[in-house]
Amino acid sequence: MRGKLITLEGIDGSGKSTVAERLQENPEIKAFGPVFTREPTRGTLTGNAVERAIQSDTDQLAELFLFTADHAEHLAKIVKPALENGKTVISDRYSDSRYAYQGITLKTRLEDPLEWIKNLHRGWTIIPDLTFLFDIRPEVSIERCGKRGEQSKFEKLEFLRGVREIFLRLAAEDPERFIIMDASRSPEHIEKEVARKILEFLSRN
Ligand code: ADP
């Protein structure tokens, strides 16, 4: 039987990586041997290209294609083989991050960037079975990150407000797949709840 694909999504500093790390140490999660992964991928040609693009002044459309190339690489090398082996895959960021982030970066370039980017993925991506949206006010997440990923604070705040709005819209459109987590709580609390919901989901499906 094909494994399940679970994704963690949310704006920068919402605590996804912190929870992903904690889940890897959680004995009940470890017991079923999930594959932990992330986007951008680490140490690959495409993942490195994305990291460099993020750090530089790369054209936003070029950036979208780099991210999308990395998604293809991620699917081909990690996600698909693991799912075909019946493994559960837990990914820190996945396609919804593209819809939400590039939905904002491309808003002056394309008429309806969200639909356009979704269409670009159609037919070859694998839609997650379950997605946790780490929802938080950008004021709080920026405070947590300090100077990480710097732009002017105002731009960053406005930008992340837009990204958060798209994430919430995606969740509202697909309530069966999304679970919205209040990410302003402690990492312990969030991790316990995510673990419990993963275990419930896997026992039902
Ligand atoms: P993300 O992966 O969503 O960008 P991180 O997990 O890297 O976020 O967390 C960003 C920063 O916020 C880190 O310094 C981390 O220690 C801190 N942090 C993460 N989760 C919480 C939380 N629930 N409460 C307070 N601080 C947190």
Image: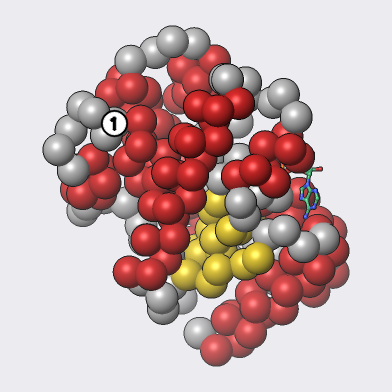
Q: Residue, x 43% and y 53% (percent of image)?
A: 165
Q: Residue, x 35% and y 37% (percent of image)?
A: 104
Colour setup of the view: secondary structure
Q: Quadrant of ligand 1?
A: top right
Q: Residue, x 18% and y 43% (percent of image)?
A: 112
Which image quadrant for residue 105? top left
Q: For this view, does 162 lie left or right of residue 152?
A: left
- The residue that mark 1 highlights is 106
**Residue closest to the eye, 63 or 158:** 158
Which residue in the rendered view is the most extreme toward the top?
57
Q: For this view, does 58 lie left or right of residue 40?
A: left
Does the rendering let one see residue 147? Answer: yes
Which residue in the rendered view is the most extreme toward the left?
111
**Residue closest to the eye, 139 or 115:** 139
Which image quadrant for residue 42? top right
Q: Is residue 187 above or below residue 54?
A: below
Q: For this view, does 119 lie left or right of residue 151?
A: left
Q: Is residue 53 above or below residue 9?
A: above
